[in-house]
């Protein structure tokens, strides 16, 4: 038995919940990008979302829909990345206690950012402890609700509001490019595309080193891979989810991959041409378009820039290289 899949109605409800809580991020254009691709490209800038990535949408939507009893018992999640910050910030806004489980060697800046938003960080030894067991123990002790990073109905619906806003702002598109890790953003985007621009071809974009989504699509079942190594640290998940996979399988045109070098080129493009700081994972979707991994001449194309949280020292090194 599988849990009910989210629908576009859930995305509409999420967009009502998020109104006034999340930023309605801008849609930007670039004549350089248009010239390089021969297309009309619309960039949905979730790097300008609160806490710097689209994940605030899903996290806030999920916590907002908890019952008063559940809210009183708090929430728990495991992440050292943007989901941790999203849950910490959304919890603070909604007056809910958040426990974030992170590996003991998580970057100090990520831990500090999460604590800065009011999240309580609990660490585990990633070589010895099972993080899911740590989460279960906290759930049992406190009654907290686990909010996973992608495989959750309200999380997926929340992520789908970014694409909804894009279609609401610019109208129907011929193609939409969305990066994927666990597939929450892609699945949510598919729900919005099918409802608002039914002829739009939706492409998923993954790091070449972590192409479990592409393999899963080819094989027709969820393929698990060893933890991949890529600059795109927000997309190095090992497998798609039970909820995200069926939506992606049904709705995606294809899943393509880009290399780390192509991500760095794209990061430079954003800095130089569009004056934007975009994290490596946030460059995936644009890289597929600018490097013409999928050719889109003459088309109206949407691209979701997923986030802008990058360590500044690493950013400097990558831009200078
Ligand atoms: C989490 C994240 C992703 C991947 O999102 P999924 O919903 O897991 O596919 C992509 N980009 C950024 C910036 C992220 O934080």
Image: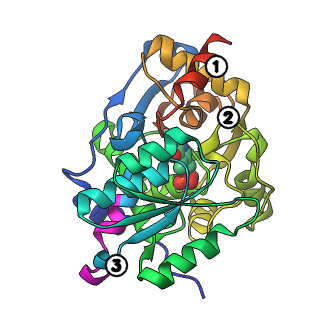
Image position, residue 17 (x, y; %)? 24, 61
Task: Tell how many labels.
Answer: 3
Q: Which residue is mark 3?
A: 73
82 and 141: which is toward the camera: 141
Q: Residue furthest left?
A: 20
In the rendered image, the vertical position of residue 254 relative to residue 124, given as above or below: above
**Does dot 3 land on a helix, a strand or a loop?**
helix
Which residue was labeled with disc 1? 318
Instruction: Identify which residue is drawn at 47% across, 83% down.
Output: 141
Q: Is residue 200 visible?
A: no
* Residue at horizontal 46 percent and vertical 57 percent from the top: 188
- 51, 295: nearer the viewer: 51
The residues tagged by marks 2 and 1 sit, at their Cα atoms, a distance apart of: 10 Å
Q: Quadrant of the N terminus?
A: bottom right
Residue 64 among those drawn in magenta: yes
Q: In the picture shown, does residue 264 fall above or below 32? A: below
Pointer 3 residue Cβ closer than 8 Å to ligand 1: no
N-terminal label among 1 and 3: 3
> Secondary structure under badge 1?
helix
**Magenta span:** 60-70
Residue under the image location 74 percent in, 54 percent down: 212
Q: Position of residue 34 (x, y in %)?
A: 49, 18
| Mark 3 Cα shell of 10 Å, populated few (<14), some (14-19), many (≥20) | some
Pointer 1 with pointer 3, Cβ within 8 A: no
Location of the C terminus (image quadrant): top right
Residues at circles 2 and 1 in contact by the CB criterion of under 8 Å: yes
User: Mark 1 and mark 3: span between their CA atoms?
Assistant: 43 Å
Q: Which residue is mark 2?
A: 231
How many neighbours does mark 2 have within 10 angstroms: few (below 14), some (14-19), or many (20 or more)?
A: some
Q: Is residue 14 above or below residue 278?
A: below
Q: Quadrant of residue 224?
A: bottom right
Q: Position of residue 307 (x, y in %)?
A: 47, 38
């Amino acid at each position: 038995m599988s849990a009910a899949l989210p629908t576009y109605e859930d995305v509409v409800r999420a967009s009502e919940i998020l109104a006034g809580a999340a930023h309605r991020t801008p849609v930007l254009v670039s004549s350089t990008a248009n010239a390089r691709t021969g297309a009309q490209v619309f960039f949905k800038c979730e790097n300008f979302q609160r806490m710097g990535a689209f994940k605030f949408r899903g996290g806030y939507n999920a916590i907002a829909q908890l019952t008063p009893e559940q809210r009183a018992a708090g929430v728990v999640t495991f992440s050292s990345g943007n989901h941790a910050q999203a849950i910490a910030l959304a919890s603070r806004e909604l007056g809910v206690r958040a426990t974030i489980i992170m590996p003991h060697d998580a970057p100090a800046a990520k831990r500090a950012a999460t604590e800065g938003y009011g999240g309580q960080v609990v660490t585990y030894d990633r070589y010895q402890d099972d993080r899911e067991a740590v989460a279960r123990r906290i759930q049992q002790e406190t009654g907290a609700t686990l909010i996973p990073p992608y495989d959750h109905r309200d999380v997926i619906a929340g992520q789908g509001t970014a694409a909804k806003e894009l279609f609401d702002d610019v109208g129907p598109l011929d193609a939409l490019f969305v990066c994927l890790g666990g597939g929450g953003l892609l699945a949510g985007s598919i729900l919005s595309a099918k409802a608002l621009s039914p002829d739009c071809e939706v492409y998923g974009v993954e790091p070449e080193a972590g192409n479990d989504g592409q393999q899963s699509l080819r094989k027709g079942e969820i393929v698990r891979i060893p933890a991949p190594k890529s600059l795109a640290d927000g997309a190095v998940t090992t497998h798609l989810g039970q909820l995200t996979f069926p939506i992606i399988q049904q709705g995606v045109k294809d899943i393509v991959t880009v290399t780390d070098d192509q991500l760095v080129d794209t990061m430079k493009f954003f800095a130089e041409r569009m004056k934007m700081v975009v994290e490596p994972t946030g460059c995936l979707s644009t890289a597929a378009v600018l490097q013409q991994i999928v050719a889109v001449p003459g088309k109206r194309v949407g691209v979701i820039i997923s986030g802008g949280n990058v360590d500044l020292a690493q950013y400097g090194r990558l831009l200078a290289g």
